[in-house]
Amino acid sequence: MRTQQNQLHIKYFSDLGASPTPLAFTEIYNSLATKVVDGQENPFSLIATNKFYEQQKFVAKTDHVYSAVPVFVSKAKWDKWPADVQKLVKDTVYELRLWQRERGRLLQEEYIAEIAKKSEVYKLSESEKAAFQTAAAPAYAWAKQQYGAAYEDLLNEVLQAAK
């Protein structure tokens, strides 16, 4: 399984029973084609736009990652803006998040439809997702140990919000 080149992804997929193979993103298509890896993990947008589905017969919708689309501004630049501009930017970004999330859901359905023309798309049931979560528990514990209390607090906040 192709993973990102970071230890948490390697640990996560190892705990799930895969044989993680960290590869650069640019290597995925050819690695699937030449069977260096049998699978990869990416959002549907990247699977569709990079045509990874041409090299894999199956795609699973696991919902194991939520990919936020954050907006960043350097503190130095932010602090130079007047308060009314800061408020306008905050309010606009806050309002746009709803549009972006809805647009993302619509695009995902379009990407899934495109992928389904060449690959079988399997959607995990809630019980299958729960089994994945149980299997991934050691990766959470590992990350807490590696990254400390700040990671654990953030993880707990995200898990509570997801309920």
Image (cartoon, rainbow, N blue to C red):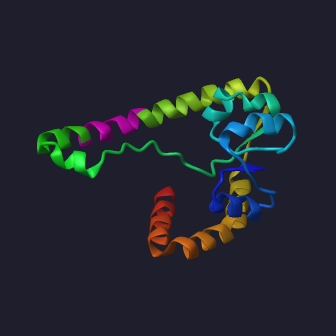
Quarter of the figure with residue 107: top right
Asked if residue 57 can be seen in this view, the reply is no
Asked if residue 102 can be seen in this view, the reply is yes
Which region is colored magenta?
Answer: 90-99
Quarter of the figure with residue 57: top right
Apparent side of residue 34 relative to residue 79 in the rendered image (left or right):
right
Q: Residue at x 84, y 34 (%)?
A: 33
Is the magenta region chiefly helix, strand or loop? helix
Apparent side of residue 79 relative to residue 59 in the rendered image (left or right):
left
Q: Vertical placement of 120 versus 142: above or below? A: above
Q: Residue 144, position in %: x, y? A: 55, 73
Quarter of the figure with residue 25: top right
Q: Residue 153, position in %: x, y? A: 45, 70
Apparent side of residue 150 relative to residue 84 in the rendered image (left or right):
right
Towards the viewer: 163 or 57:
57
Q: Residue at x 41, y 44 (%)?
A: 70
Farthest residue toward the right? Answer: 35
Apparent side of residue 56 relative to residue 22 in the rendered image (left or right):
right
Towards the viewer: 110 or 69:
69
Q: Verify whether residue 69 appears in magenta.
A: no
Q: Residue 143, position in %: x, y? A: 58, 69
Q: Verify whether residue 91 appears in magenta.
A: yes
Q: Vertical placement of 79 versus 11: above or below? A: above
Q: Residue at x 61, y 68 (%)?
A: 140
Q: Residue 14, position in %: x, y? A: 76, 62
